[in-house]
Image (tube, rainbow, N blue to C red):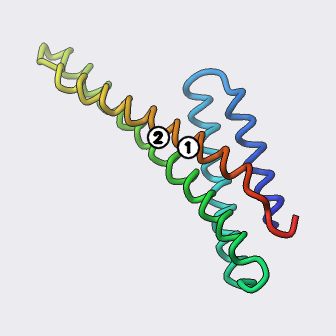
Amino acid sequence: ALRRDAERVGRRAAVAQEAVGEAARTEALHEVRKAAKRLRYAAEEFSGRTVQVLGRKTMRLATAAEEVHDELGEHRDGIAMQRVLRDEAKRLAARGEDAFALGVLHEAERLRTESALWRAERALERLLATAVPGA
């Protein structure tokens, strides 16, 4: 089960790598996030049952999967926040109001989102390099 879930993360990561366009890439990264979450929960459950034999290895796998899940969650939240800020800035501008502050917030969020993606990519590299116990 762990091997299958780890392979799923790898396949989804490959699809995300090849995705063209922001929307397609965001959706593909969300699929990676969901696969990492599934792997994390499976590894946590498995390590709890077999602590003597595979506990540490599966916990390392679970921790790596959790990191991918969390960072991709930050990335996804950032994408959503940028969209909200952009839409609100357009609304204000259409009414002739100053939207400069929203532009500043958007840029800060863009940088935070970019950083989360960078961290997610590093976490994914670590996850994919983590040996699957029993494999």
Q: Secondary structure under badge 2?
A: helix
Q: Residue 96 falls in which quadrant of the image?
A: top left
Residue 40: % across, % down: 64, 64
Residue 128, placed above or below residue 22: below
Circle 2: residue type: Ala
Task: Write the residue at 75% across / 36% down.
Answer: 14
Q: Which residue is mark 1?
A: 120
In the foreground, 123 or 6: 123
CB under 8 Å between callouts 1 and 2?
A: yes
How far apart are labels 1 and 2 at the CA level? Answer: 6 Å
Q: Image check: 80 left or right of 120?
A: left
Near-viewer residue (97 or 100): 100
Dot 2 alpha-carbon crowd within 10 angstroms: few under 14, some 14 to 19, many 20 or more: many
78 or 67: nearer the eye?
67
**Residue 134 location, quadrant:** bottom right
Q: Position of residue 76 (x, y in %)?
A: 48, 41
Mark 2 — residue? Answer: 116
Q: Position of residue 56 (x, y in %)?
A: 68, 74
Please state if 111 lies on the left or on the right of 27 as rendered.
Answer: left
Disc 1, SS: helix
In-image side of 82 versus 9 (left or right): left
Residue occupying the point 64% across, 46% down: 124
Q: Quadrant of residue 10?
A: top right
- Residue type at tag 1: Ala
**In-image side of 57 versus 101 (left or right):** right
